[in-house]
Image (cartoon, grey):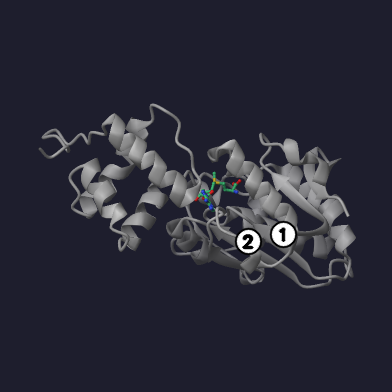
């Protein structure tokens, strides 16, 4: 019997839930807790309707087919939490200005925004660079490249457009920043070209090897590791330590911290913000 019941409610049996949890962990590293069947069915029902899939069993069969790239990407898009906003945790941006930018002087700076969602994080970093250069003539004169990656193709599409409206054009920004960093656009506000120029977006899954991305001076990996089990978190941080230049900085979300890998890094606390500096 079709499991989307006559009243339209999608059902997920315990076996289907376990199979889906395994799929999501293998595909994205994201670990669903127990008892989240409702989250799964509520996030997937629209996508399943679009693909003509009537039950979780049909979905799992289609995903195991291997040729369903669009469906797979759609499931990952639906299951990721993409909440973000401008200058999230402002103390991190103050720390960039107080510590990281002055140390860079004339050298090239490569920054990775490792789960960039719809772009607010990497564009905020680029805005901070702009601001720093205006306030400190002759400083930070080397090229600054911001590589912004995410597993979700739909948030990357939004990020590349660089046009924001409603809450996403206001949360975290004051009026002066809106005037300075954006131009009016028929659909809201568009990030100005001088801010966009530094940022390059790329689809990238953090569970894969980082070698293709090169080495970085700064990594922002904020508010994503919370979705991964501890072994995967440890693995990602170990690999980030290898992707950082000696003396490079790792920023985590304000509720996240380094635990067992802490001896590779020293904690830097400045301007109310915390970052982890890779020992030289
Ligand atoms: C809550 S948002 C955080 C955005 C931003 N870093 C911030 O702090 O505002 C988490 C992002 O992590 C992304 N994500 C989840 N799993 C991922 C993975 N395996 N590889 C890359 N990105 C992932 C999601 O698509 C989502 O956009």
Which residue extends farthest top?
Answer: 35
Residue drawn at (66%, 34%), measured in percent from left and top?
255
Q: Which quadrant does the N terminus fall into? A: top left
Q: Give the image location of residue 266, x and y in percent.
A: 85, 43
Is residue 183 shown left or right of residue 187?
right
The answer to which image quadrant residue 248 occupies is bottom right
Of 120 and 280, which appears nearest the observer? 280
Tell me the crowding category of disc 2: few under 14, some 14 to 19, or many 20 or more residues within 10 angstroms, Cα based.
some
Q: For numbered disc 1, what is the local secondary structure? A: helix
Q: Give the image location of residue 81, x and y in percent.
A: 48, 43
Q: Which mark is residue 210?
A: 2
Q: Which mark is residue 243?
A: 1
Mark 2 or mark 1: name the one nearer the start of the chain: 2
Is residue 105 shown left or right of residue 254?
right
Is residue 143 shown left or right of residue 52?
right
Q: Are marks 2 and 1 in contact (CB under 8 Å)?
A: yes
- Residue 256 appears in view: yes
Asked if residue 54 is positioned above or below residue 106 in the image, the reply reads above
Q: Which quadrant does the C terminus fall into? A: bottom right
Of 30 and 155, which appears nearest the observer? 30
Of 169 and 176, which appears nearest the observer? 169
Q: Measure how far apart labels 2 and 1 are at the Cα level.
A: 7 Å
């Amino acid at each position: 019997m079709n499991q989307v019941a006559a009243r339209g409610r999608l059902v997920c049996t315990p076996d289907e839930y376990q199979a889906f949890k395994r799929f999501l962990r293998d595909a994205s590293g994201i670990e669903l807790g127990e008892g989240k069947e409702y989250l799964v069915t509520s996030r997937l029902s629209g996508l399943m309707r679009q693909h003509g899939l009537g039950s979780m069993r049909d979905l799992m069969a289609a995903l195991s087919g291997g040729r369903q790239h669009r469906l797979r990407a759609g499931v990952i898009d639906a299951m990721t939490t993409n909440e973000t906003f401008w200058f999230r945790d402002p103390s991190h941006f103050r720390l960039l200005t107080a510590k990281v930018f002055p140390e860079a002087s004339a050298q090239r700076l490569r920054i990775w925004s490792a789960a960039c969602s719809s772009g607010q994080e990497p564009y905020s970093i680029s805005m901070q660079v702009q601001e720093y250069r205006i306030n400190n003539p002759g400083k930070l004169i080397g090229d600054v490249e911001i590589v912004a990656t995410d597993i979700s193709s739909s948030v990357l599409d939004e990020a590349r457009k660089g046009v924001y409206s409603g809450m996403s054009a206001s949360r975290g920004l004051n009026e002066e920043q809106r005037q300075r960093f954006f131009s009016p656009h028929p659909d809201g506000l568009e990030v100005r070209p001088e801010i966009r120029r530094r940022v390059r977006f790329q689809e990238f899954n953090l569970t894969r090897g980082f070698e293709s991305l090169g080495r970085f001076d700064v990594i922002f990996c904020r508010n994503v590791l919370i979705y991964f089990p501890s072994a995967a978190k440890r693995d990602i941080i170990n690999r980030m330590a290898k992707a950082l230049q000696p003396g490079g900085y790792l920023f985590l979300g304000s509720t996240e911290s380094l635990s067992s890998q802490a001896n590779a890094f020293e904690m830097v606390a400045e301007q109310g913000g915390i970052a982890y500096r890779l020992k030289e």
